[in-house]
Amino acid sequence: MKNRKFIKIINTVLIAVFVFAAFNIGKIYYDYNKANNTYEVIQDEYIATKEVESNSEATQGNDEQPPKSTEPPIAIDFDALLNRNKDVIGWLYCPDTVINYPVVQGKNNDQYLRKDLDGKYFVSGTLFADYRNGALDEDANYIIYGHNMKNGTMFSSLAKYKQQSYYNQHPIMYYLTPDGNYKLELFAGLVVKRDDKIYLPNQSEEEFAELIEEYRAKSTFKSDIELEYNDTIVTLSTCSYEFDNARYIVIGRLIPV
């Protein structure tokens, strides 16, 4: 009799654990699907011009770099976007990838970590610039953060820059702002610690220049981009999993177009 009661209790516990796990898995899929749908709607609503021709077929299966465009292949309706959220400062776009998102800047680096443009809970969060960033022409290093989502969205594709072939096919991103558009020429990518020097503000020009050269030497891909004095550097940062609190960063120089 005692054994039957014990078995019944164990079965009840196992069923409860199964139901709880199934609920959590279902919620994760729901949140991911909601995030995908939300950003598709945002892209349809605020992208005024879409890319006419993709370079993916031309580069698929080889390591040759696609032609370097001088003009952004999309245009953003910033008037409408700013009417929705005054914290919007730009839009980051990488051709033939999932990176096609608005960028905000909050009062701190937690504000948009799990929030959408309307300030509601959002599992994917919103791409956000470091709250310490000034204007683009003021900071030597402009930092933008995004989640490494397991469904392949947001900044998860940054990890693909660990392969030279991926860089060869995607050497350029575009950063569009209400005040002007820029090309982001990528030149380095590497795994760093969460408290790496790249995240420190107010470094001297000499210290920062030495750090950038160190990163170029350690980069997971090689680039022929030549840096010039007073270049604005943009650092894209996401979680990585080589060790606790690891980050993978992709670094580029910003060129007005």
Image: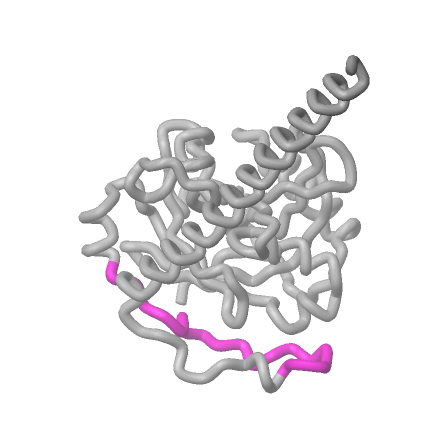
Tell me if I can see residue 251 in this picture. no
The image position of residue 239, as x and y in percent, is: 63, 41
Residue 129 relative to residue 22: left or right: left
Residue 46 relative to residue 37: left or right: left
Residue 169 relative to residue 85: left or right: right
Residue 61 relative to residue 198: left or right: right
Q: In this view, does 27 lie above or below 193?
A: below
Range of residues picked out in magenta: 59-77
Q: In this view, does 255 lie above or below 209?
A: below
The image position of residue 115, as x and y in percent, is: 39, 37
At 76% from the left edge and 56% from the top edge, which residue is drawn?
A: 220
The image position of residue 241, as x and y in percent, is: 73, 41
What secondary structure is the magenta-colored segment mainly? loop
Q: Which residue lies furthest to the top in this view?
A: 2
- Residue 48 vs residue 206, the one in the foreground: 48
- Residue 248 vs residue 68, the one in the foreground: 248
The image position of residue 156, as x and y in percent, is: 60, 52
At 22% from the left edge and 47% from the top edge, which residue is drawn?
A: 84
At 58% from the left edge and 30% from the top edge, which residue is drawn?
A: 200
Tell me if I can see residue 71 in this picture. yes
- Residue 141 vs residue 50, the one in the foreground: 50
Q: Reply yes or no: does residue 140 show up in magenta.
A: no
Q: In this view, does 110 lie above or below 52?
A: above
> Considering the image in quadrants, where does the C terminus appear?
bottom left
> Considering the image in quadrants, where does the N terminus appear?
top right
